[in-house]
Image (spheres, grey):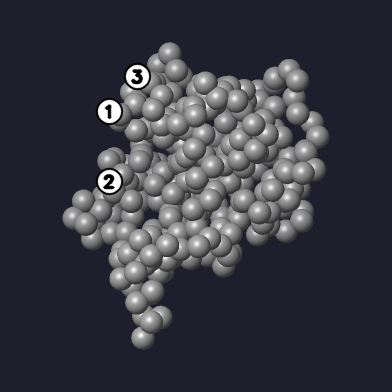
Amino acid sequence: MCWFKRKNKQNAITVFPVHWKSKLVTSVPFYRNLSDDKRRHFEKRMLVFLSTTTITGIKTTVEDEDRMLLAASAIIPIFAFSNWYYHNLNEVLLYPAHFDDNFAIGSHSKAILGMVGFGYMDGKMIISKKSLHHGFKNETDKSNTAIHEFIHLIDKADGDIDGILPTLKANSNVVPWVHLMKKKIEEIRASKSDIRAYGATNEAEFLSVVGEYFFERPQLLAKKHPVLYEYMELIFGQPLVDRSLRKKAKVIQHWDPCPCDSGKKFRNCCLKKTKH
């Protein structure tokens, strides 16, 4: 992995807010499943992120919980990289809702939930406040917009967003990984995969989409895509399959996707089975 000199920023946050601990346990399964020592390490990493990255609200107020969830999202994918930080990120722009290519909020033409900036926007990330919170509330999905965008930033660290992280290059696994990506993208395009369709856009999006799946539903990923799961462990350096990363329970409505991931509506799957 390639490490970089840490940025410095005035008014650094030096004390972890005590009330965040209980909120993290409730809202962030990744944190909840850590030992006490690793939780303290996670908290220190969050403080470093918040002291080196400005969070600016655009037509919205940046709340305490927004900062907490953004920092947690940033640390989850790099938790195994002890000396790594986001050298290519200076500011997160928090939008109240989705936006389009012209950064128009609430556009009816296109709904972008998160974006890593390029050109004059280099060093910035834009993310929808609604999607930030939704990523830690939905129990049955395999997505988290904030984690998705932070994985893009890790991918971008070597200058190319290509779906290949330095951890793969260090272990000479680039060629088999590229072959696996192509195979899995073909399966998505052929509607033969439960991986989100956006992952078939290109290799970079595939990595981020599968990265979301890995951090949100590791056991399901290991069950349905065992080789892909093994690569995620190698890429991010984190064995997650034995962890229970389920979010807090919610009421499943009959029209919701079935929690068993059959692809059917709840009313047409497990709900029907319970009535027999």
Mark carried by residue 109: 1
In the figure, 258 relative to 1: above or below? below
Q: Is residue 112 visible?
A: yes
Mark carried by residue 102: 3
Tag 3 secondary structure? loop
**Foreground mark, 3 or 1?**
1
Mark carried by residue 200: 2
Give amino acid for label 3: Asn
Label 1 packing within 10 angstroms: few (<14), some (14-19), many (20+): few
Tag 2 secondary structure? helix
Q: Residue at x 56, y 58 (%)?
A: 247
Q: Residue at x 65, y 38 (%)?
A: 65
Give amino acid for label 1: Ser
Farthest-out residue, bottom: 276
Label 2 and label 3: CA atoms lie apart by 24 Å
Label 2 and label 1: CA atoms lie apart by 22 Å
Q: Position of residue 34 (x, y in %)?
A: 68, 57
Q: Nearer the viewer, residue 222 or 70?
A: 70
Disc 2 and disc 1 in contact, CB within 8 angstroms = no
Disc 3 and disc 1 in contact, CB within 8 angstroms = no
